[in-house]
Amino acid sequence: MENELKLQIIGHIYNDYGGKFGVPRQSGLVEEVISRVVLLPEFRRAEAFRGLTGFSHVWLLWLFSEGFASGEAGEREWQPTVRPPRLGGNQRVGVFASRSPNRPNPIGLSAVRLLEIAQEEDGPVLLVAGADVLNGTPLLDIKPYVPYADARPQAQGGFAVPPEQARRLQVQIAPELLAQLPPDKRPALLAVLAEDPRPAYHAGRQEVRTYGLSFAGFNVRFQVQGEVLRVVALEQT
């Protein structure tokens, strides 16, 4: 059809986010989590990355692979308005004024810090910091981040709260629980929890509720009271 365009997946993004709950709301918020960007064999050629080491950041364009409503015949449904978690989940805005996954085309984009182009046996792999995607997310494209064109310090952010203004929780975890995690995963988990993974409308609740977050092969169970998040259990999955 005239209005259809065929795209192809060129690779996948791998990290420790085992479920949607806990994935940062935007890229760059939790740089402690490192992701591997692995291209499919036909795109995993060294010459395709020539010149990329001169850039500190890249854009990843990817597909939302979970969280879509489906209509008949497998067609995705989208809504003209959505309820952003940042607004408490009870206020509607236009889908094009949000980064909701429930949109006409399930395309996401993330600005991430390029740490290294690792040369592995089967070809180059990108190591990036700050991705806000699930483990195994399909990748559509990689583009260099160009500061003079992509950065607009004077731009207005609407209802999106800048990171420096967002509330961060104090994370408490017993040493014996923390010891269950591999040492290289500990700073990343603490940073993810400090961002308060709960829906925004849960932040003002007085009752103590236990939440579960899948990260690095563990089910992390925690409770929040005021500005303190306490990890109550780590269960290996």
Image: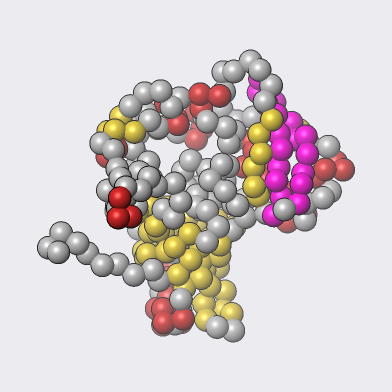
Residue 34 occupies quadrant? bottom right
Please state if 78 lies on the left or on the right of 65 as rendered: left
Q: Which x, y percent locates residue 214?
A: 64, 47
**Residue depicted at x 52% and y 77%:** 124
Q: Which x, y percent locates residue 143?
A: 36, 64
**Residue depicted at x 33% and y 55%:** 74
Rendered position, 87 above or below 154: above
Magenta highlight on residue 212: no
Tell me which secondary structure the magenta stretch mostly adopts: strand
**Residue depicted at x 46% and y 51%:** 66
Q: Which x, y percent locates residue 75?
A: 30, 53
Quarter of the picture holding the N terminus: bottom left
Between 227 and 67, the residue placed more toward the observer is 67
Between 18 and 14, the residue placed more toward the observer is 18
Between 1 and 108, the residue placed more toward the observer is 1
Please state if 101 lies on the left or on the right of 232 as rendered: left
Residue at the extreme top of the image, as rendered: 206
Q: Is residue 46 visible?
A: yes
The colour scheme used here is: secondary structure
Magenta highlight on residue 229: yes
Where are the magenta residues, as a range?
217-236
